């Protein structure tokens, strides 16, 4: 063997059978594979070195043409012997897996393919649907990290029955079309949270001083906003606020993972308590929520009766078809429930805020300001 060939060959020959069987089973659960597919996936470096030698089924050593230069001829023959041994070894492993795995399946064809269906048979249909829903949410919120999002979607889709693979794959072909500044921050945020390292970044709060401030955060949880699916970081801010805070991922800049430091998420942090009464990513955090009484017109009642609002009381119907319902929502430092107000305003004239008085007044002020703005611009010519 040549000097360049020997290390790769030694590494290949030293792969234990148990590890090889585990990897093969994982690959066959992911998708149907031929022996050639499995060799290429298990030994990508060797496979790349033999491009042009024989495709998915390599020739036996004696098939090597004699007209090549001696050095190339010897090297290629060595690669061919190794690849041929690998094919034979994996073929024996497949026979072992067929005896060990109840859901092993041979798929006829040239070349034949193999798969293990265990992971699908272990899921209840509702569990499959839950995974599919998670995949659809991933698709709708995926931004520029197309490669990673596509890989995640493919893995989630593999749990579905095979007859659904085609339509699901076609539905995510344009993954990543959503534009967001999150693209620049995802990898460092993921590295910090998954590795248990603090994250240093600059942040400018909307409506604040307008200045960028440096923060260091121990991330406890990454949460998706239920309305727009934007990602938020929740955790202990240690450099300025020194308390559990929420930061929008797309507003971060100048991120740096402090890999020389580690932290642990305290058991005292309870996400359920933190997000209590939340309509987005801001909960009461141990404080008392504000109760708001709303009356919905008959033409909006169906939306309320369809449900899906965790912080809403049981609606009370009226003879005219309208409904009254109470919702709980956290308030900010100004005393207003900022996260639920856009939802209330989205009903337009089909809802009335009945109480409390200060929230009703704010709701009326918002509607009057919208009407005034519309009147100011109606029928007039554009001013240059």
Image (cartoon, rainbow, N blue to C red):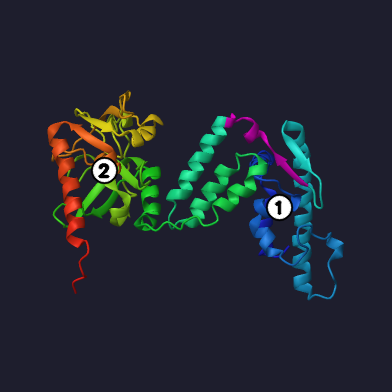
Q: Where is residue 307 in the image (x, y as percent from the top left)?
A: 39, 30
Q: Distance between the residues labelled 2 and 1?
A: 56 Å
Horizontal side of 1 relative to 297 (left or right) equals right
Residue with the mark numbered 1:
37
Q: Where is residue 296 in the image (x, y as percent from the top left)?
A: 29, 33
User: Foreground: 164 or 124?
Assistant: 164
Q: Which region shows up in magenta?
A: 113-125
Q: Does the magenta stretch include residue 336?
A: no
Res 138 label: none
Q: Can residue 212 be seen in this view?
A: no
Q: Is residue 122 magenta?
A: yes
The local crowd at label 1, few if under 14, some if 14 to 19, many if 20 or more residues have their Cα within 10 Å, is some
Q: Where is residue 114 in the image (x, y as percent from the top left)?
A: 74, 43
Residue with the mark numbered 2:
345
Q: Is residue 53 placed above or below 30 in the rendered structure? A: below
Horizontal side of 40 relative to 235 (left or right) equals right
Name the quarter where the N terminus is drawn.
bottom right
Residue ID at (27%, 43%): 348
Q: Can residue 17 be seen in this view?
A: yes
Assess whether mark 1 and mark 2 are in contact (beta carbons under 8 angstroms). Answer: no
Q: Is residue 71 placed above or below 343 in the rendered structure? A: below
């Amino acid at each position: 063997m040549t000097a360049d060939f020997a290390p790769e060959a030694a590494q290949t020959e030293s792969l234990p059978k148990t590890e090889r069987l585990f990897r093969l089973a994982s690959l066959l659960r992911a998708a149907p594979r031929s022996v050639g597919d499995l060799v290429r996936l298990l030994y990508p470096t060797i496979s790349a070195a033999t491009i042009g030698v024989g495709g998915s089924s390599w020739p036996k050593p004696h098939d090597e043409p004699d007209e090549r230069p001696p050095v190339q001829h010897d090297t290629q023959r060595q690669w061919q012997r190794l690849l041929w041994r690998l094919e034979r070894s994996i073929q024996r492993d497949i026979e072992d897996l067929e005896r060990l795995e109840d859901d092993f399946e041979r798929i006829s064809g040239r070349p034949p393919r193999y798969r293990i269906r265990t992971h699908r048979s272990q899921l209840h249909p509702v569990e499959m649907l839950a995974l599919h829903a998670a995949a659809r949410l991933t698709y709708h919120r995926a931004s520029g990290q197309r490669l990673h999002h596509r890989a995640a979607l493919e893995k989630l889709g593999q749990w579905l029955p095979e007859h659904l693979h085609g339509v699901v794959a076609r539905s995510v072909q344009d993954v990543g079309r959503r534009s967001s500044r999150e693209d620049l921050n995802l990898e460092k945020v993921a590295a910090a949270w998954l590795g248990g390292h603090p994250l240093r970044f600059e942040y400018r709060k909307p409506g604040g001083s307008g200045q960028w401030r440096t923060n260091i955060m121990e991330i406890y949880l990454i949460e998706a906003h239920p309305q727009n699916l934007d990602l938020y970081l929740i955790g202990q801010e240690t450099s300025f606020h020194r308390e559990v805070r929420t930061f929008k991922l797309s507003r971060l800049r100048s991120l740096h993972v402090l890999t020389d430091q580690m932290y642990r998420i305290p058991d005292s942090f309870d996400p359920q308590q933190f997000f209590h009464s939340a309509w987005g990513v801001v909960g009461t955090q141990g404080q008392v929520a504000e109760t708001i009484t709303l009356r919905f017109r008959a033409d909006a009642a169906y939306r309320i009766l369809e449900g899906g609002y965790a912080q809403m009381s049981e609606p009370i119907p009226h003879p005219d078809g309208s409904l009254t319902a109470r919702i709980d929502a956290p308030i900010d430092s100004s005393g207003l429930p900022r996260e639920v107000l856009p939802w209330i305003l989205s009903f337009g004239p089909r809802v009335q805020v009945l109480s409390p008085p200060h929230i009703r007044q704010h709701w009326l002020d918002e509607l009057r300001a919208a009407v005034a703005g519309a009147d100011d611009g109606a029928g007039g010519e554009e001013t240059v």
